[in-house]
Image (cartoon, rainbow, N blue to C red):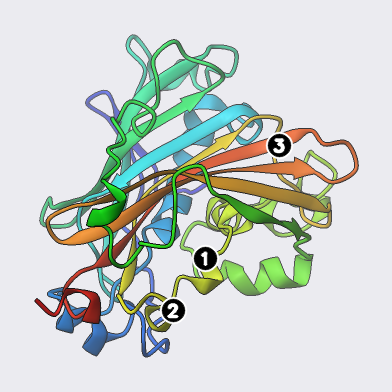
Amino acid sequence: MADDIEIKDGKIFGGWRAPENLARASTTSIHDDDVAKSVGMRGGTIQGTIHLSMFAPLAQKIFGDRWFEQGTVSMYYTFATTDKEEVRAIIELPQGTSEEILPIATKDVQVKAWAELKNGQQIMTGTISTGSPKEPSYLQSLELKNSKPEDLRILARYKVGDELPSEEILLTQDAANRGLRRITDQLEYYKGKDKSPWGNAILYPTALFEAMALGFSRTSTDEFKAVPFYGATELRNINGPALIGVPYITKGKYVCIGVSRKTEYFWLDSTLEEKETGKIVASMRHLNRFMKAGSPHYKD
């Protein structure tokens, strides 16, 4: 548990974090300073999914270890951060909750959550929940708006309902350890089977996203002739947590494809299933955007 968590005014605050932009060497992506500035960003951006791992220790403080088994983080990214900018995660406490009665591990509860810069600029907003609360998550509550196929240029070859080829996922502890340096909140549960009550180390939120990000290795600037960036992500533990060293199958499909003033976008829904049993361990809803600015598809 992080030792700089603070509870006050009905909220739980994480400590200030300064993640490094370790993807900046990707010279054709929005993480590169020159590419980012060419499409109107302040500099090479940090993936919103890197910040998701800040919420895990706060959710654990509120909901206990059950959050890793049946918890959800659902975030819409509102402002892109750059290398080593200080950020923190904030979650509203459930109504009537005090620090003395935490964790509240048996209730199905959803609360508001967000992250911010030191100047108060909100960088993402959404919900954190455990179990099956009555209200939909932040992203599930949004109306997904499809565009007419003839309005698409960057994503013209894709259709709503298209299923992506399934992939087998097996994350080793060595690979997980190498990835940990990207995130700021490195819980002991991520580091080895001897540190986890589930018999194996668990996937941290950023790694869980990557396990269900079907086809994202092909969403490059070169592939689409447009600069891609993440718009929103929901990670839902259903029969979690997802474990290191266990083989899974990821399946997914496009549930919405559209056009906005500055971007084209798709929403992807995907699941992570145990290869041996077929049991669904986790699911994801994710928004990927592609910048019109700088794209040869939008020279006019």
User: Mark 2 or mark 3, which is nearer the start of the sequence?
Assistant: 2
Quarter holding the C terminus is bottom left
Q: Which residue is found at the position 46% from the left and 26% from the top?
A: 129
Task: Name the quadrant containing residue 28.
Answer: bottom left
Q: Which residue, given by chain and number where applicable, does mark 3 sit on?
A: 281
Q: Relative to 155, does residue 3 appear above or below in the rendering?
A: above
**Spot occupied by residue 66 in the image (x, y as percentages of width and height):** 63, 27
Give residue 138's mark.
none
- Mark 1–mark 3 contact, CB under 8 Å? no
Q: Nearer the viewer, residue 176 or 2?
A: 176
Q: Which residue is found at the position 71% from the left and 30% from the top?
A: 239
**Spot occupied by residue 183 in the image (x, y as percentages of width and height):** 49, 64
> What is the CA distance from the residue labelled 1 to the residue labelled 3?
20 Å
**Spot occupied by residue 97 in the image (x, y as percentages of width and height):** 38, 14
Quarter holding the N terminus is top right
The crowd level at tag 3 (other Cα within 10 Å; few <14, some 14-19, many 20+) is many
Q: Nearer the viewer, residue 200 or 157?
A: 157
SS for dot 3: strand
User: Mark 1 or mark 2, which is nearer the start of the sequence?
Assistant: 1
Judge whether residue 92 can be spotted in this image: no
Give residue 223's mark.
2
